[in-house]
Image (cartoon, rainbow, N blue to C red):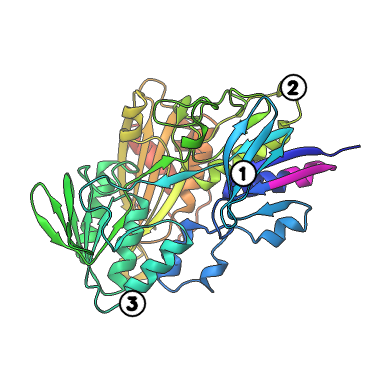
Amino acid sequence: MSKTKVIVVGASHGGHQSVLELTHKYSDLDIKLFEAGDFISFMSCGMELYLENSVTNVNDVRNFKPADLEKLGTEVYANHEVTKINPENKQVIVKDLKSGKIQSYDYDKLILSSGVTPNNLPVPGHELKNVYSMRGKDWAEKIKAKLSDPNVKNITVIGAGYIGIEAAEASIKAGKNVTLIDMINRPLGNYLDTELTDILSKELTNKGVQVVTGAKIESYEGLEAVSAVKTSDAEYPSDLIIQAAGVKPNTDWLRGTVELDKRGWIKTDKYLRTNLPDVYAIGDAVLAYSIPAQKDMPIALATVARREARYVAEHIFENTPSIPFSGVVGSSALSVFDYHFATSGLNMTTAQKADIEIHTSFYKDTLRPAYVPMEKGNTEVYVELDYNPNTHQLLGGAVLSTYDITAQGNVISLAIQQGLKLEDLAEADFFFQPGFDRQWSLLNLAAQHALGELEFTK
């Protein structure tokens, strides 16, 4: 009896989790995993740690080694680009990028986890030397070499999201002059509300980053290699440009076969099925179902891809899945020099894009009771809670401090996922110990503040 053929496209988080789940749940599967890159599978979210010499080796910054999955019976193909799907014959066309050989492979089930590609700004000069992207092992090694090059003095980072902040911080720690440029009016503005980004903007400036916001980039200047970034208002000397200005779905090869939206995201139904029979899509190239927004949104996170993969593997052999994919909250965290933050769900910016009515409450306090002095660890803490103004249901939130309170972000995420209200969070039963927190826990106090209750001052 022949084995059921499952092909997985893309070896990042979604592809990795798909294979793990399939091999654990089922026997008699013929699984093939195709990856266009030559290194399986670099974890770009670990790039800052590599650039700051905080990892064992660049080759260790990966989700898995091919041998890890081959031990489970999966065939893993690096340097193999899937270029086309033939749904009539249930085949994929694959090009071996080393030999140039083109071959077709049959599938019974096909999982697309094709991911995203960094945006390369289409400005004059983008083809100059020393214009890099902050993604993938090859770029990581090139950036690392520039950070240790004494001839590279001025680094300009384009994009003040997570990746841009990581690039700026690593460059500052390497002793470079750093300019951080973004078109929106504040760094991390797509992830945090204004009160928190104001704190982090000041932190970036205090650590030596020149922050330029609301900027329109006109060109990259230089002859063979870049020498400056020109905006509509100024020109910034640049020996190296690190582009971190967002991503686009890696789906051009699917056009005309798999249904895409106008921006190129793969369209799926509530079971993560595409328009093609037995073809599923997960990961960054798919709009994820947001629990707080109750609609599909771009949420490019490893955690999202893995949850989607887990769901698909669970239901892949059901004619009609017994339940739809439940969705995700969307939670993430980042350090910005001395500050650490975690954020979950919606904020004012993402809620506006999704046309969701939302109110926000900003709460500032100290981590521990007032009798603990600051020099003994009683740091300032900040909480943002975003909620439905009519029902008080939690839709988003964030925590920030120089002390690592990011685990509180997981509490907010769980509260959002379970549909809790401000009133629930205000009374939730959390522990108290003065070496850790207040008599009312931080999230209790933040919710009570949002409800307009009497401030607890001890």
Q: Position of residue 129 (x, y in %)?
A: 28, 62
- Disc 2 crowd rating (10 Å Cα; few below 14, some 14-19, many 20+) is few
| Mark with earlier residue (2, 3) | 3
Q: Which residues are magenta?
A: 22-32
Q: Is residue 6 above or below residue 439?
A: above
Q: Is residue 29 part of the magenta span, yes or no?
A: yes
Residue 319 tag number: 2
The image quarter in which residue 319 lies: top right
Q: Secondary structure at mark 2?
A: loop
Q: Secondary structure at mark 3?
A: loop
Alpha-carbon span between mark 3 and mark 1: 39 Å
Q: Position of residue 173 (x, y in %)?
A: 31, 72
Q: Is residue 425 above or below residue 318?
A: below
Q: Is residue 102 part of the magenta span, yes or no?
A: no
Front residue of this view, candidates 222 and 363: 222
Q: Amino acid at mark 2?
A: Asn
- Disc 1 crowd rating (10 Å Cα; few below 14, some 14-19, many 20+) is many
Which residue ends up furthest to the left in the rendered image?
233
Front residue of this view, candidates 80 and 187: 80
Q: Which residue is located at x 87 percent, y 38 percent? A: 2
Q: Position of residue 27 (x, y in %)?
A: 84, 43
Q: Nearest to the eye among marks 2 and 1: give it.
A: 1
The image quarter in which residue 444 lies: top left
Residue 148 tag number: 3
- Disc 3 crowd rating (10 Å Cα; few below 14, some 14-19, many 20+) is some
Q: Amino acid at mark 1?
A: Val
Residue 94 tag number: 1
Q: Is residue 88 above or below residue 206?
A: above
CB of mark 2 within 8 Å of CB of mark 1? no
Q: Which residue is located at x 31 percent, y 74 percent? A: 174
